[in-house]
Amino acid sequence: MDYLPVEIIAPVLHLALPPIGPKHLASPNACADYMRALHELRLVSWTWRAVLDAIPELWALVSSSFSADRIIKNLQKSRNSQLTIHYRGSSSRLGKIHFMQLVEPHRHRWRVVWLDGGSLEDFLHQLSHPAPLLETIYLHGYVPTTYDLESFSLLGHQVSNIRYVDLMQVLPYLDLSPFQDLRTFKLWYIWTHPISAEWLVEVLQRSPCLEELCLLDLNLQVPTVTAPIVTITLDYLTLFNIKDIESNTVDYILRRTNAPNCVQFRLTIDDEQPTNYDPSLLLDSALSSFEPVVQKLGRNAHLIIGVNHIFWYNTSLLEPMPLPIPFLLLEIEDIPLPPMIRWVERVVDPTNSDEHPDERVGTLYIGQGTPLGDAEIVSQLIRLKSVTQIWVKETGTDVRRLLQILGADGREPAFPRLRKLGLQADGWNAHELLEMVSARFSEPARRCPHLVVSVRAPDYRDGGGSAFAPDTLSAIHAIVGVTVLFENPADPK
């Protein structure tokens, strides 16, 4: 390889280095690992050393985890390349003031500023002046309450070049101008001061190419008098995370957002009691523009719906790839809400019944809080065609009532696509299971799918045995379409 032209060697060596972009800097050892790999490549041969030393952008990384000598050398070897400035208080070898004194003369080269750790007061003076090439600003920390709020304007309001914004706790101390043309926008843990929801919407309007939006634990103030709703279409938005924000604010944001390609969505309502918000308003109105997104989710998608949360994401985008997980995970262990069930029936069921109905898995968890005695809720729940598995794991769940529901008469069986029933809780016996499967499969015209019943394997170490008498188990297996599977076997040792 030493005999190859420099034009070929250089990009190959560049690709051999660990990535060091904004998303990688959160790793505690990212900068140290990068420099270690760079120096190891230099040791391979004199040719490689000469090539690497002649590429300024490879040295354009300055981190507080480096010694002062290493920082000075990197600043020199990077020449006029755009710089990544990285400060992490927990692993810093330099004080904040000393660190900033080293990098301040090169602010005209700053491209990424990543500051994380404790009080950010010592950084604010430098961040109040323009940095013309800055594209990424990451500020995680706090500002002392004694700091003069009037004196800090981020980059002198010259923020038009910024594409990546990640701010934790510091936003109330910024004299803000709206960002624009962002690709990533993240705001974290800001409760001390209210933030205008109108300002946030203005940022979204100015950033049509936004790809990631995260709003976590914020005190967003919704105007008392709102203008007519203007929908903002964000065609490039693939990740949308809203967590611990009041439900009326969530409604305000979602009604104004259309993200047709959002394959990763996480919403958690900040209400200690789920009854404090109207789920019908959220599911039937605020999320209406997202329904086509859910219906387009492929076989690699995962959808979770709970009392105060709804998530969906494409598992093929996760690293590392997870074990096989169900397409639908419906959590109604606490307070099953009719609007939530109706939403699944309206949005999810048609897709699941049309596309690979025997391959997609929809899991329903039932707990002791599930009111199986509520006729209205049960009548809606049993119609769901997207539910292919039911699991009961919580002690105190009314399993007997569930078995009665599954074996009830009707033109269609309860949960018509049910293929697996997990009974991992107590409160039932084998004879009751026999009665259920006998009734469920008594009418061939109902065409019930093959049902696998998963029960806990007996633990012989405690002197226990199987809850199934041999004749009862044989009677169940004699029913065409039913299999009993003993899972989680006890350790024979």
Image: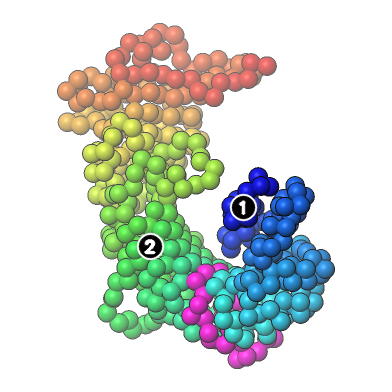
Figure quadrant of the C terminus:
top right
Q: Amino acid at mark 1?
A: Pro
Residue 88 x %, y %: 71, 66
Q: Is residue 119 magenta?
A: no
Residue 421, placed above or below residue 211: above
Q: Indicate left or right for 152 with 67 as reference.
A: left
Residue 164 magenta-highlighted: yes
Left or right: residue 372 versus residue 194 is left
Identify the element where label 1 is drawn: loop
Q: Nearer the viewer, residue 376 or 245?
A: 245
Q: Is residue 160 visible?
A: yes
Q: Earlier in the sequence, mark 2 or mark 1?
A: 1
Amino acid at the residue labelled 2 = Tyr
Query: Residue 429: x, y in percent?
Result: 43, 22
For the residues marked 2 and 1, what is the alpha-carbon distance in whole angstroms?
A: 39 Å
Q: Which mark is residue 236?
A: 2
Quarter assignment of residue 480: top left
Is residue 248 in view? no
Residue positioned 58% across, 63% down in the render: 22
Q: Which residues are magenta?
A: 145-173
**Residue occupying the point 78% across, 71% down:** 72
Few, some or many residues within 10 Å of mark 1 (<14, 14–19, 20+): few
